[in-house]
Image (cartoon, rainbow, N blue to C red):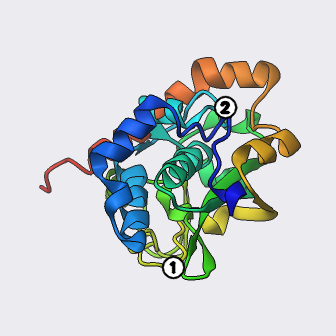
Amino acid sequence: MVNHLRPTSILDYNHSSIQTLVLARGWRELPYGDRIGAVYDFVRDEIAFGYNVSDEVPASTVLADGYGQCNTKTSLLMALFRAADIPCRFHGATIHKRLQKGVVNGFAYRLAPENILHSWAEVEFEDRWVGLEGVILDVGYLEGLRSTVATGGAFLGYGAGTENIDNPPVAWCGTDTAIQKTGVNRDLGVYDDPDAFYREHGVNMTGPKGLLFRQVVRHVMNRKVASIRGCAMQPTK
C-alpha cells in the first residue's frame, strides 16, 4: 500500500502546482469513488490529448503543458490520485504504431518504431484493481474524430483503438475504461510507478530520432490533433 501512495521523480505530487490544484478542487474531501471520478474526469477532459517532449516528464510538467498522451496522462493521473490519497499502480504495454496513423503520416510514420510503449493507471477500488486507459482522449478530440474520420463501430487510428468509437467505455463508473485497447499488442505487466517501468524499458524515442520527434514531429502531430478537435466545435450545416 505504501508503494502505491508514495511520490517519485515522475509522480512529483508534492510540487506546489499539484498540491494547489488538489486543494482548490476539494478532491480529498469527496467520498472515495467520487474522488476517483473527479480526478479522472479532470485528466481526461481538462488535460487535452497531445504529445509532450518525452514519456518520462514529471507530472507537474504535464499539468503545466495542459496536454498529454497515454504515458504522460497516466503519470499525471497517478500523481493526482496519490496526492488525493488514492492508491494506484502503473500497467505497461505496447501498441502497434498503426494506432497513431492519421495523427502522424509519411516519413515520420515510417520513422516510428513498430511497437510503441504504452501505459495506463490502475486504481484500487472495492478490493480490486481497475484499469483507466480511457483517460487518454479528451471528449472534444473524440467528438472531432466522429465528425471527420470515424465512421462508427470498430475504429483503429488517430490515437484511438476501440470496438465502438460511437460509445467507447471511457466514463468512470467503477469498472475498466479504455480507448486504445484494440491497439495493444503486448502486455508488459504492472509496476509500482512509471519510474520503475522506464528504468527497465526505456522510452519511445531516443537519439537522433528522439531529437527529431521533440523538435519537429510532435509539433506537427499536435497541430493535427488540434485541427481534429476543432472540427467538433463547428456548427452543423
Where on the picture, by quarter, is residue 225?
Answer: top left
Q: Residue furthest right?
A: 200
> What is the secondary structure assignment of the residue under circle 1?
loop
Residue at the spot 84% in from the left edge and 39% down from the top edge: 199
Question: In this rendering, would 130 be left or right of 24?
Answer: right
Residue picked out by circle 1: 175
Quarter of the picture containing the N terminus is bottom right
Position of 155 relative to 75 (above/below) = below
Give the image location of residue 189, x and y in percent.
Answer: 80, 63
Give the image location of residue 77, x and y in percent.
Answer: 51, 51
Q: Amino acid at mark 1?
A: Thr
Position of 53 relative to 83 (above/below) = above
The residue mark sitting in front, 2 or 1, is 1
> What is the secondary structure assignment of the residue under circle 2?
helix
Q: Nearer the viewer, residue 118 or 166?
A: 118
Give the image location of residue 202, x and y in percent.
Answer: 82, 38
Of the two numbered discs 2 and 1 on the same chain, state the one appearing first in sequence: 2
Residue at the spot 44% in from the left edge and 65% down from the top edge: 36
Is residue 60 visible in the rendered image? The answer is: yes
Where on the picture, by quarter, is residue 31?
Answer: bottom left
Mark 2 in CB contact with mark 1 (< 8 angstroms): no
Residue picked out by circle 2: 108
Quarter of the picture containing the C terminus is bottom left
